[in-house]
């Protein structure tokens, strides 16, 4: 097991230390530098990046004190889809995007801007990500069909479309697709 963990750590370290700004996708925050253990000074333990002040995407898009605005939801998700598509063109896939804490919204020049803050959770070129959002781990989503190269643990861009659809259902319609098709513990009937 230690060999596996060390391999994962090396993959993350290489991805972080070779990270370069993606000009066509400024919403992806790039790590500023790697962090190493004080004891050994060679053990990679994390990374530092620009701080984003603002709410998480879910908090920004859902205002508990106002009526649901489906036009706002459509606009916000369309903008998020645009960010993912630009990232896909640059060789990025976002397996951890449906973890709603990975998207922050910050006001810049009076307008809200979305930022993707979990660089470790982004598949960049040959650098795979070891995590995938729990939010898309459902009966409906068969991960096998979303691999571009299963041997190297690389996903295809189609996973991003499935992820954003899952997010839309969870945030807008309050339907968690993870439970669709499972039986209710109370009624013992399938959940729709």
Image: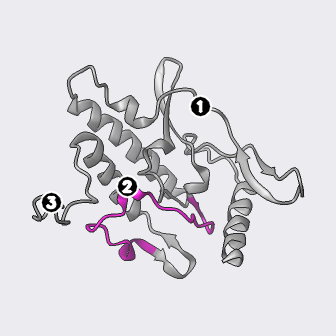
SS assignment for the magenta stretch, majority? loop
Residue 14's x, y, as percent?
A: 74, 62
**Image check: 52 left or right of 34?**
left
- Residue that extends furthest to the top in the rendered view of this protein: 110
On whether residue 151 falls in the magenta region, the answer is: no
Nearer-N-terminus badge (3/2): 2
Q: Residue at x 38, y 36 (%)?
A: 58
Label 3 or label 1, whichever lies nearer to me, is 3
Few, some or many residues within 10 Å of mark 3 (<14, 14–19, 20+):
few
User: Dot 3 lies on which element?
Assistant: loop
Marks 3 and 2 close (CB-CB < 8 Å)? no
Label 2 or label 1, whichever lies nearer to me, is 2
Q: Is residue 25 above or below residue 113?
A: below
Cα separation, mark 3 vs mark 2, equals 17 Å
Q: Residue at x 70, y 50 (%)?
A: 20
Residue 170's x, y, as percent?
A: 28, 46
Residue hosting label 2: 135
What is the magenta range? Answer: 123-147
Residue hosting label 3: 191
């Amino acid at each position: 097991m230690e060999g596996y963990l060390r391999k994962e750590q090396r993959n993350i370290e290489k991805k972080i230390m070779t990270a370069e700004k993606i000009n066509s996708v400024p919403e992806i925050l790039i790590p500023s530098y790697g962090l190493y253990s004080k004891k050994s000074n060679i053990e990679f333990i994390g990374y530092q990046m620009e701080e984003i002040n603002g709410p998480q995407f879910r908090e920004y898009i859902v205002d508990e004190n106002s009526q649901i605005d489906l036009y706002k939801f459509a606009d916000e998700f369309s903008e998020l889809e645009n960010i993912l598509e630009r990232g896909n063109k640059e060789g990025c896939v976002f397996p951890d995007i449906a973890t709603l804490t990975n998207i922050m919204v910050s006001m810049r020049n009076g307008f809200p801007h979305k930022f993707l803050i979990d660089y470790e959770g982004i598949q960049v070129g040959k650098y795979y990500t070891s995590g995938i959002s729990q939010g898309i781990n459902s009966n409906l989503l068969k991960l096998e069909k979303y691999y571009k190269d299963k041997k190297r643990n690389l996903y295809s861009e189609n996973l991003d479309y499935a992820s954003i659809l899952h997010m839309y259902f969870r945030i807008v319609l309050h339907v968690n697709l993870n439970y669709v098709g499972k039986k209710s513990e109370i009624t013992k009937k399938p959940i729709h």
